[in-house]
Amino acid sequence: MRSNPSSLELSLSRGRLHALRAGPQGGSPAICVPGLLANCRSFDLISAALADRGHEVVALDLRGRGRSPATGPGTHGWRNHAEDVLEAADNLGFRSFDLLGHSMGAFVSMQVAALAPARLRHLVLIDGAGVPEPAALPPILAAVQRLGVVYPTREAICGLVRDAGAAQPWTELWLGHYLDELDDVPGGVRARTSKEAVLEDLVYGSKQDAKAFWPRLTMPTLLVRASRPLLPGAGFIVGAALRDAFLDAVPSAKAVEVDANHYGVMAHPDALRAIADFLT
């Protein structure tokens, strides 16, 4: 039987992280790392599926996302976020744990694996392995431009995101995610996520090659690939060629194809089942 997740506030050396914890405390631990523009609510359905299997699941808001405050310039980037993940695990008493990352969270998770491979029991990379196809980038950049904009109502911004078409399934997962993201400000509502933190991570990522992490992935690894483009006619975050190169380079990895796009993969029954089975 599912229990409601509880909020956590983790005090780390670089700042405060907000998180949601689900499942029995003392269960097999798993930490979830959201993507560039996402908060911990993006893992709601995955967390619930794992909690049902007896895992203690902690989904993080990275610094500058959701309810975790941004910190100063130069304090973000994959490595800094990865060090936050490891420090959060220390605070939670997780000596070893399963690690799940979606999109940019997959790059942060690979950085964790490079820094502390012995601490990871399993690694799950959800639609993130290397450089996305160029045609997948414009919808992501358009979403970045919405940060900092004041909208008159929650309905206005949620309708805009829904009608853009990428955030699927809307009511089952992403509506709750975006409603939790919004804060009341003079004149309406605005996303809590920091545009400055996101842009810093974008610039940082543009200078990195995630393939450099692949030789360090010695733990059992699952790549969950969305087999639909981000939007009709757009590109893939993990193209077929990138998937094949990843599997060739990482002997410990296997992949599962899910009939969903980059956002829908976080809710698709096939993804939930594959992840839960892999971590059991």
Image: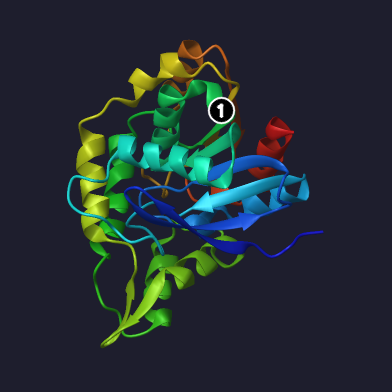
* Three-letter code, disc 1: Leu
Are there few (<14), some (14-19), or many (20+) residues within 10 Å of tag 1?
Answer: many
Name the residue rendered at 76%, 60% in the picture: 2
From what the image shows, is residue 106 above or below residue 41? above
Name the residue rendered at 61%, 52% in the picture: 267
Asked which quadrant contains residue 223, the reply is: top right
Q: Give the farthest residue toward the bottom.
A: 187
Asked which quadrant contains residue 22, the reply is: bottom right
Q: Between residues 205 and 175, which one lies in front from this camera angle?
A: 205
Name the residue rendered at 37%, 71% in the picture: 160
- Quadrant placement of the N terminus: bottom right
- Observer able to see residue 51: yes
- Quadrant placement of the C terminus: top right
Asked which quadrant contains residue 110, the reply is: top left
Q: Is residue 133 left or right of residue 278?
A: left
Q: Position of residue 14 (x, y in %)?
A: 31, 49
Q: Pointer 1: what residue?
A: 120
Q: Position of residue 12 (x, y in %)?
A: 39, 50
Q: Is residue 272 left or right of residue 139?
A: right
Name the residue rendered at 54%, 21% in the picture: 118
Q: Is residue 206 left or right of residue 175?
A: left
- Observer able to see residue 268: no
From what the image shows, is residue 140 above or below residue 237? below
